[in-house]
Image (cartoon, grey):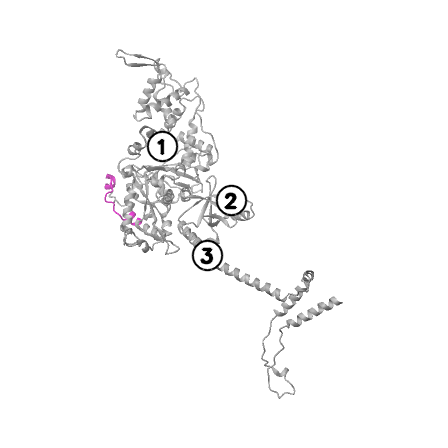
């Protein structure tokens, strides 16, 4: 089977001597012919050009191995980083981001030097101190490539911190590249931008550029020079106001003006909003144009995600009589191929939690996923387990998503469809009609349009599918759509037609990888999942790690005696709290994240919680609620039993009081009664022993030879043994006599 390569793949080269080195694929051309790879451990090298066919041949021969685990992949949350860590990361990112996007030019030796030199000169322009050197840029971009091409790779070993660079006060010497004609008296050497100049720039930008007139930046510059860099004003023959500008070598250039504008206004979105207002920005300044397919270059260029509430009611896994409502179906589609790359069926939504679960599925192995639902497939039937270049979703799904995690950790660009741009999300929405069309004839509990009308059938009562069964049905639908469905209106280009590629999603996906590749990227599945999973808080208790009312344990807890410490109150309140991630589809496990994202601890259900095994969060919540309801019902019934018990105890007490009143010896003093406790106890014990001893029943004597009366006629007879039952009255009399006799003596 042909082994496909993707951006971010790690490959290990092994020679006959056993020595090896690891490279990362950092770029693949659209024709799937060449790739650039870099040794992940070198300190001074650069990316090397590789032929895809050579890499595939090496993999087939066994001299190259694809590595599944990425040691540089991290689980980093913004809230876990210090302010200094964020500052140094963002500082480095601002330095190299304009450079690393120049693909593939930056990978070629003859172009790389010029690109970096220009960036350094631009950065140093206007600086007298804190200048940048090319060596620093080379070091940063090398680390960026080696550690997975994401923003968080610039965190110094994910632990070091640093301070964000500050702009320095200008000196006397002119910074930046000398002017070509600096000796010309009109052009001159130029000026350094001072704090006064910056104040003028800020004022001018607000007045001439960030307004509704939508001036060009060059126009804003011209107006700035006219109004703030003139020596005097006079009037011409027509009375028009004329500004006399100061000499050119005393004025800022447009390059300087533009540079400082971009420094202080890096967010293009805010620029456009300030110029046009939000509504016009949403309507006119779209990040994508034309139809969805034309906006993509190949598989992974853009995924679209959307959700729909299925027109069917489902029941609980625990109890067929529990109708739990209508499930939400999330679908993630590759825009280029129309391949469904990820799904999630649940009760969340539409919300960012459900969207994250779908995106997690998009990056997961589909063979293992289908197997959970009893469906056996090959990898070729659903070969989608990647991270895209960009994700487009409806605001309802992605507006609350933790993009602070996705962007720096996985380097995914998030695109939210604006409320005025319904045309952005057409690919996925068309798919939902197909799903409903397949589901309606076969799934019990499907809703018709008239289900709310008086006298209409209550379709909820027909529900038989649980969440797992409905998910299984959706999987079969997707497998059909991916592998068999002919896309009649798919806009095939000339090369597709020439290659006779059928407009079937899987065929388009495979063709795109071979001919338009370069956007799909791989990350370790665990890392992707933990970045996308919902997060929560768990508590260490003496019974286990408590989350959602369920108890877990883990190896670390056992080794460090967490539960013993909790029982003895050896933990502080803050020490008992744990940050965890979890999968709402299956709560068999939760994951404790390390503070720096280097690792995680897998926790599993305790023995007494096995009833929750292989259950979703929804099923467990229903079960817990049902147990609460049952408990409340039993409490009402139990109360009557408690009342009856108290009545019985009161009856016994009343009888004992009456007996004491009837039989008590009134001649004994209180002292006599208390002094005789030990002796009374001995008497009572003796009586109890005799009364509690075994009592033998009447025995039939079979061997009469030993007890036959010699004067008897010889006939056998039955003999009754004396009873062993003690005579309590005789004992009491004897003991009383002994006690009285003892006092007399």
Q: Which residues are magenta?
A: 478-498
Look at the numbered disc 3 and give the secondary structure of its residue. Answer: helix
Residue 382 drawn at (x, y percent):
33, 47
Q: Identify the mark nearer the N-term, 1 or 2.
A: 1
Residue 568 appears in the picture as rendered: yes
Q: Which of the 4 image quarters holds residue 17?
A: top left
Residue 337 appears in the picture as rendered: no
Q: Which residue is mark 3?
A: 636
Q: Is residue 495 magenta?
A: yes
> What residue is drawn where x is 34% and y is 23%?
207
> What residue is drawn where x is 49% and y is 60%?
641
Does 336 sit left or right of 121 as displayed? left
Q: CA distance from mark 1 to mark 2?
A: 45 Å
Pick whichever, 698 or 740, lies toward us: 740
Q: Is residue 128 above or below residue 743?
A: above
Q: Is residue 532 above or below residue 612?
A: above
Q: Residue furthest bottom?
A: 713
Q: Which residue is mark 1?
A: 101
Residue 686 image label:
none
């Amino acid at each position: 089977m042909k082994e496909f390569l993707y951006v971010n793949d790690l490959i290990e080269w092994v020679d006959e001597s056993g020595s090896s080195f690891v490279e990362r694929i950092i770029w693949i051309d659209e024709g799937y012919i060449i790739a650039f790879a870099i040794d992940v451990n070198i300190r001074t090298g650069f990316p090397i050009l590789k032929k895809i066919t050579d890499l595939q041949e090496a993999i087939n021969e066994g001299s190259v191995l694809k590595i599944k685990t990425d040691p540089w992949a991290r689980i980093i949350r913004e809230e876990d980083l210090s302010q200094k860590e964020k500052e140094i990361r963002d500082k480095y990112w601002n330095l190299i981001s304009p450079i690393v996007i120049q693909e593939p030019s930056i990978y070629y030796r003859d172009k790389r030097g010029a690109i970096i030199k220009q960036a350094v000169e631009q950065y140093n322009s206007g600086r007298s101190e804190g200048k940048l050197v090319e060596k620093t840029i080379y070091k940063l971009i090398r680390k960026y490539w080696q550690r997975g091409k994401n923003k968080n790779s610039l965190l110094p070993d994910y632990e070091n911190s640093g301070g964000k660079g500050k702009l320095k006060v200008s000196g006397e010497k002119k910074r930046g590249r000398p002017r070509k004609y600096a000796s010309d008296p009109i052009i001159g050497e130029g000026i350094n931008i001072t704090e006064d100049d910056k104040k003028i720039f800020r004022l001018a930008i607000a007045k001439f550029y960030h307004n509704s007139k939508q001036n060009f930046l060059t126009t804003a510059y011209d107006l700035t020079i006219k109004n703030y860099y003139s020596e005097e004003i006079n009037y011409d023959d027509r009375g028009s106001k004329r500004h006399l500008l100061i000499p050119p070598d005393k004025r800022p250039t447009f390059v300087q003006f533009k540079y400082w504008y971009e420094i202080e206004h890096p967010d293009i979105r805010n620029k456009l909003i300030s110029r046009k207002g939000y509504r016009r920005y949403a309507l006119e300044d779209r990040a994508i144009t034309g139809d969805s397919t034309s906006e993509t270059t190949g598989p992974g260029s853009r995924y679209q995600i959307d959700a729909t509430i299925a027109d069917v009611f489902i029941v609980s896994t625990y109890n067929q009589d529990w109708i739990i409502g209508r499930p939400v179906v999330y679908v993630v589609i590759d825009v280029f191929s129309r391949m469904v790359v990820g799904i999630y069926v649940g009760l969340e939504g539409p919300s960012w939690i459900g969207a994250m679960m779908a995106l997690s599925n998009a990056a997961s192995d589909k063979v293992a996923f289908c197997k959970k639902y009893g469906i056996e497939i090959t990898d070729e039937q659903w070969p989608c387990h990647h991270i895209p270049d960009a994700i487009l979703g409806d605001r309802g799904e992605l507006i609350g998503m933790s993009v602070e995690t996705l962007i720096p950790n996985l380097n995914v660009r998030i695109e939210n469809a604006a409320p005025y741009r319904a045309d952005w999300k057409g690919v996925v929405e068309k798919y939902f009609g197909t799903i409903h069309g397949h589901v309606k004839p076969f799934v019990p509990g499907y809703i018709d349009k008239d289900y709310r009308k008086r006298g209409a059938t209550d379709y909820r009562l027909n529900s038989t599918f649980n969440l797992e069964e409905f998910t299984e049905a959706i999987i079969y639908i997707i497998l059909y759509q991916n592998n068999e469905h002919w896309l009649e209106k798919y806009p095939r280009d000339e090369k597709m037609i020439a290659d006779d590629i059928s407009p079937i999603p899987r065929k388009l996906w495979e063709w795109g990888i071979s001919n338009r590749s370069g956007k799909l990227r791989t990350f370790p599945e665990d890392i992707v999942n933990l970045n996308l999973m919902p997060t929560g808080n768990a508590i260490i208790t003496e019974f286990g790690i408590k989350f959602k009312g369920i108890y877990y344990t883990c190896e670390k807890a056992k080794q460090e005696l967490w539960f013993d410490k909790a029982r003895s109150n050896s933990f502080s309140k803050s020490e008992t709290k744990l940050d965890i991630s979890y999968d709402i589809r299956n709560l068999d496990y939760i994951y404790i994240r390390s503070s720096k994202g280097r690792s995680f601890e897998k926790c599993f259900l305790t023995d007494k919680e096995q009833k929750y095994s292989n259950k979703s969060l929804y099923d467990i919540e229903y079960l817990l609620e049902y147990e609460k309801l049952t408990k409340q019902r039993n409490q009402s019934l139990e109360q009557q039993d408690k009342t009856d018990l108290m009545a019985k105890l009161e009856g016994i007490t009343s009888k004992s009081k009456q007996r004491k009143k009837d039989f008590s010896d009134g001649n004994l003093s209180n002292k006599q009664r208390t002094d005789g406790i030990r002796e009374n106890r001995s008497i009572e014990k003796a009586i109890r022993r005799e009364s509690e001893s075994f009592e033998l029943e009447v025995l039939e004597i079979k061997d009469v030879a030993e007890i036959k009366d010699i004067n008897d006629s010889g006939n056998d007879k039955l003999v009754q043994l004396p009873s062993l039952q003690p005579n309590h009255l005789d004992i009491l009399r004897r003991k009383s006599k002994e006690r009285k006799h003892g006092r007399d003596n």
